[in-house]
């Protein structure tokens, strides 16, 4: 039985292509209204997982539930509750946008009387209701094609929307529009989206699932992942003065703070110091006060560096590689997790 | 099958906007027109035992080999190449509905093309005079028998075309494959029967077995007004079998 609070549930999903493992023992759940980002390097198994959830691909083992319906046992019911935009977003080139969406609405069993309203609503939401509505799909730009794909995915008012790389191939302006569109959809549907643009996931998603080599290597909110994978706190300061004086001042605040990198501005001689400490408490204020009070030093900038999702992603995937390498070397399939950095 | 009408309308539209449909239509009607002209000339020059309609429908296999691959090669192969088949399968439609809609749309066009060829006897009769040539050219028996034969065999040929299209992403490969299979069905069996007297060890390759699947024999029966249930069962069951195989292919490779 599927959980009543989860709109998506995967239990020990595995998919093998011959001897190749696409995903292995993948378990996760997504609660109603959540926006979850799938992250992972190429070949990590993101698209395979999404295709299994969309009912396009049977899993070798494990169970997948969408809106309480088992995808393998009741694919029609699961598909009625799902809107899926595949990675390449294939669309018929010779149809007009409105005509295509009306066709898709009929296939998605939207009641006949509702079709016009739902198509209009989806087009308005995706900003397709002006000129684009009557255009031939083949003549649309990449950004508009992506919007047609999303409009199609949300037409049937699905409980679950899966968007595979919705921002791929878009220019920065279109990416911002896409982000706004995802924000507008937030209240309507549970969403899973995959992206290579980590900043995109960071901004749009409530939670992140990081896949590597077909395994789920990390899962949680940005803050939780940062706490799990990034143990050190990093500070950055732009200072004019001797490094020995800087070191003396920061050691006076805490002996654990270490300078890890330095870069001198060739124009004015200011040095950008990066400092790290394993301490979790925020030392910004005492450090800044100390550096500022030192007569031999001039401070013009100081900040606590928040780890980016990119750092978390690299730490998580690296850890999974280390585990895998360790497992292979020892002949053990599931070694204990390595210590996070 | 509740999505079938929607899918069928969509498939008809896809065929209407595809250039290959018009190329197939024009070429097929040109070839059929040429054959009909030849048949009328032959009937006028020397006395024929066989009615002109039967002579005309005797050349059915040439337009079939042209029409069917061109109408069906695009159907599933192109959708698979573009990825739209995958998008289609994310909706609650079943693979059987997808295959059946494509089959029905292609079969409708196939019948429309043959129906257009029905204008030839009417034109010839009106030009040559209904009283002098009309009774020969518009003799209803062979004409209706010929059309019944074309409609019945068309189900199997179009189904083979759809099946070929389901196996590949390439329209060209699909077209060549359906051409080859239909050629084998029509001419291959005839050839095996002609040389196959020493292959009677296999049950299907006996004279009776080959006769059962010999399309030209069915043609002769139909144009003489003999409508046996065996060829009807052969074509319809063959059509269902081939469409079921296409459904399995679409289901497994969407």
Image: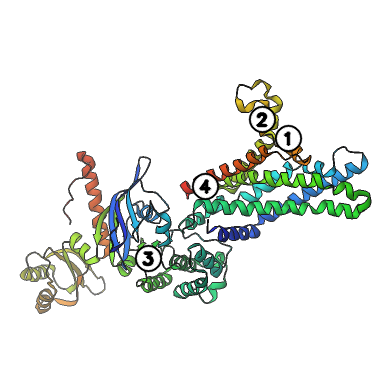
Q: Is residue A64 above or below residue A115?
A: above
Q: Position of residue A330 (x, y in %)?
A: 19, 39
Specify which label sits upstream in the sequence, 4 or 2: 2
Q: Secondary structure at mark 3?
A: loop
Q: Residue at x 49, y 75 (%)?
A: A117
- Alpha carbon of mark 1 to alpha carbon of mark 4: how far? 31 Å
Q: CA distance from mark 2 to mark 3?
A: 57 Å
Compute the Cα span from label 3 to label 1: 58 Å
Contact flag, marks 3 and 1 (Cβ < 8 Å): no
Instruction: Choose the circle earlier in sequence order: 1 or 4.
Output: 1
Picture coordinates of residue A123, whole percent (x, y):
48, 73
Disc 3 crowd, CA 10 A, few/some/many (<14, 14-19, 20+)? many
Depth check, front residue: A109 or A134: A109
On the picture, is B221 further left or further right than B133? left
Q: Is residue B235 left or right of residue A319?
A: right
Residue bearing mark 4: B247
Q: Which residue is mark 1?
A: B217
């Amino acid at each position: 039985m599927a959980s009543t609070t989860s709109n998506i549930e995967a239990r020990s999903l595995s998919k093998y292509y011959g001897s190749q493992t696409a995903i292995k023992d993948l378990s996760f759940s997504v609660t109603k209204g959540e926006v979850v980002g799938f992250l992972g390097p190429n070949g990590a198994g993101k698209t395979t997982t999404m295709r299994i959830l969309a009912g396009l691909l049977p899993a070798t083992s494990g169970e997948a539930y969408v809106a309480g319906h088992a995808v393998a046992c009741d694919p029609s019911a699961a598909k009625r509750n799902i809107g899926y935009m595949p990675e390449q977003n294939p669309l018929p080139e010779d149809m007009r946008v409105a005509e295509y969406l009306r066709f898709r609405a009929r296939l998605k069993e939207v009641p006949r009387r509702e079709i016009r309203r739902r198509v209009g609503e989806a087009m308005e939401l995706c900003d397709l209701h002006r000129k684009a509505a009557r255009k031939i799909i083949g003549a649309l730009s990449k950004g508009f094609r992506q919007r047609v794909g999303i409009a199609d995915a949300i037409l049937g008012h699905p409980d679950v929307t899966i968007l595979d790389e919705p921002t791929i191939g878009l220019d920065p302006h279109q990416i911002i529009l896409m982000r706004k569109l995802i924000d507008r959809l937030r209240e309507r549907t549970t969403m899973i989206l995959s992206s290579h643009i980590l900043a995109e996931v960071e901004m749009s998603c409530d939670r992140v699932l990081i896949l590597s080599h077909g395994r789920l290597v990390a899962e949680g909110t940005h803050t939780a992942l940062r706490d799990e994978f990034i143990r050190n706190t990093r500070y950055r300061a732009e200072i004019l003065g001797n490094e020995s004086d800087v070191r003396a001042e920061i050691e006076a605040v805490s002996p654990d703070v270490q300078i890890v990198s330095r870069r001198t501005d060739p124009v004015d001689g200011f040095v950008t110091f990066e400092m790290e400490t394993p301490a979790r408490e925020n030392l910004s204020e005492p450090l800044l006060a100390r550096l500022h009070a030192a007569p031999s030093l001039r401070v013009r900038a100081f900040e606590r560096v928040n780890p980016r999702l990119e750092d978390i992603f690299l730490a998580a995937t690296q850890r999974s590689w280390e585990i895998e390498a360790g497992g292979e070397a020892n002949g053990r399939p599931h070694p204990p997790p390595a210590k996070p950095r | 099958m509740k999505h079938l009408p929607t899918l069928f309308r969509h498939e008809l539209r896809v065929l209407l906007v595809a250039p290959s449909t018009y190329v197939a239509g024009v070429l097929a009607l040109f070839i059929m027109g040429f054959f009909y002209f030849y048949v009328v000339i032959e009937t006028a020059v020397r006395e024929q035992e066989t009615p002109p309609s039967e002579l005309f429908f005797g050349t059915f296999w040439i337009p079939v080999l042209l029409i069917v691959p061109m109408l069906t090669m695009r159907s599933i192969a192109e959708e698979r190449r573009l990825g739209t088949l995958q998008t289609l399968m994310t909706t609650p439609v079943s693979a059987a509905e997808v295959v059946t809609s494509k089959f029905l749309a292609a079969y409708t066009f196939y019948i429309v093309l043959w129906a257009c060829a029905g204008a030839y006897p009417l034109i010839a009769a009106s030009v040559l005079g209904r009283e002098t040539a009309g009774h020969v050219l518009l003799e209803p028996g062979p004409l209706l028998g010929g059309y019944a034969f074309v409609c019945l065999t068309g189900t199997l040929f179009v189904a083979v075309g759809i099946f070929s299209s389901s196996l590949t992403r390439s329209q060209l490969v699909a077209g060549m494959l359906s051409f080859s299979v239909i050629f084998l069905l029509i001419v291959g069996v005839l050839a095996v029967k002609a040389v196959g007297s020493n292959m009677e060890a296999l049950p299907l390759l006996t004279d009776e077995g080959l006769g059962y699947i010999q399309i030209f024999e069915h043609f002769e029966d139909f144009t003489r007004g003999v409508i046996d249930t065996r060829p009807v069962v052969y074509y319809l069951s063959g059509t269902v079998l081939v469409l079921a195989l296409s459904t399995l292919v679409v289901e497994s490779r969407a």
